[in-house]
Amino acid sequence: MNTRWLLRLTGSMAVSLGVLLALAYQATPARAEVINFRSTLDAAQAISTCPGGSPATGSGTMTYDTDTNLLTWNIMFSNLSGAVTVAHFHGPAAPLVDAGIQVTITDITSPSVGSMTITETQETQLRNELWYTNYHTAMCGGGEIRGQVLFAPVGGIAEPPDAAASPLKAGANSDGNSWLIASLAAAAGVAVVVFGGSVWYAKGRSRD
Amino acid sequence: MNRRTRLAFLATAALLGAAVAAAVFLISSSSFGGGSNRPSAVIVDQLDLTYPNPAFARDATSVLEKAGFEVDYYPGEEVTVDFYRELPARGYDIVLMRAHSARYQGSWQGEQKDLVEIFTSEGYSLADHAEEQQSGRLGVVSYFDDPEQRQYFGITPEFITGSMRGDFNGATVILMGCNGLSTGSTAQAFMDKGAAAVVGWDEAVSAVHTDAATLSLLRHLIDGDLPADDAVAAAMDEVGPDVPFDSTLRTYKSAG
């Protein structure tokens, strides 16, 4: 009796362990891919909807998870003529071409942070860099600033360590565009960066 | 206890022992690091801080481990100046540098330079590593997308040759960031430090594309057992250049 019980126990333990080990070996997490995008917003890209121009600028980062189809964003902006009335992702459209609304950005104070599940068609448009972010104001109801949503390069800006002390440095960024950093009023910590025709203002470059 | 009972006990013990041994083997084979003579690889995931892609680290690790490699993974926050300083001495056979990099062309302390800085995640300070800043081994880097324009230390080719300890000893170094091979100075520095092959992009590249191309490269390099040149060509046939940036993965050809 005891022997049979022990043999049954042995058998069931072996089967259970085998199943557990097989599951442990086979189990692999889902293969999600995360795609990173960026968007640099300015009035030059919104010339069709804000012909009078604007000093406003913005920049944003977006990630898209191919497993969950979730698009998340974090977009900062400043110097708009007034409060944002509405904001959207639009597409499909090449730069300077207008298109319909794809996703509404509900958090319209800077930084705009949010997420939305998108469709496969929208994913294809996004992957083809055919979306743009667009912030609307009372002055420019069709959009005061906008920025094409582009793949994020794994580059950046490189400088010598004494860059801030030099009055002028010139070189090339990793986009291959010409760039210029002029340390204007170094004491005030204001720099102007020109990227292929787009002007970025950066205040208070920290050296912490 | 009769004979059948003893046999049953022995069978139970043998099965449990085998199960424990199998579990230990599975656990050890799926974890990073180790101290054997197996080939080893490292994923330096500085990009993890800005463009995280856990699937890449997982898939690259899987490809490498299936081929018998031990794999170490360093997340972005651990990628400091001192981390890079010690990297060659760790003796890896494959070094995956999943890190931002940026090209600088211009005046550098009175000299014209054309070089690539590889990002660390260590915040820049005038006071830290002062000697290496003065000797051109460390520069300043920042991200395009950072509205606060925070600055970090970037390592230069002079850092690779002058400040890194040890030797890459025949390792293959894969520069996954932008412009790794836009100028030869960074790749040549790795070669001078003992690397057998250096692979990188000739222009800017997106995170999604460098991840896909590097995985393809690893499969051809390891599963296909191809030399670096052929593996890069096969990866480019499979994945293609990064069209928005007109960038191609290449193998560095040493001038010397």
Image (cartoon, grey):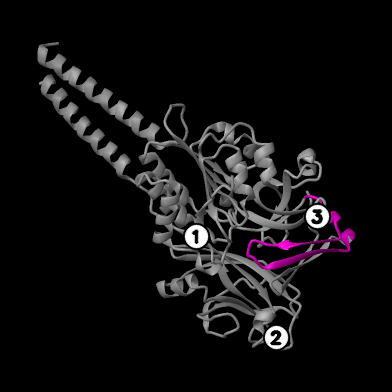
Q: Give the range drawn in magenta.
A: A161-187
Give me the residue at 50% from left, 80% from top. Answer: A92
- Which numbered marker is on residue B15? none
- Which numbered marker is on residue B208? 1
Q: Where is residue B159 in the image (x, y as percent from the top left)?
A: 68, 41
Residue B207 sits above or below residue A88 on the image: above
Give how far apart the Cα atoms at labels 2 and 3 are: 40 Å
Question: What secondary structure is found at the residue carrying circle 3?
Answer: helix
From the viewer's perspective, is B89 left or right of B9?
right
Which numbered mark, 1 or 3, is in the foreground of this view?
Answer: 3
Q: Which of B252 and B240 is in front in this view?
A: B252
From the viewer's perspective, is B39 left or right of B118?
left
Q: Where is residue B189 in the image (x, y as percent from the top left)?
A: 62, 43
- Which numbered marker is on residue A138? 2
Residue B212 sits above or below residue B162 on the image: below
Amino acid at circle 3: Ala
- Which numbered marker is on residue A163? 3
Circles 1, 3 touching at the beta carbon (< 8 Å)? no
Q: Where is residue A95 in the image (x, y as percent from the top left)?
A: 58, 80
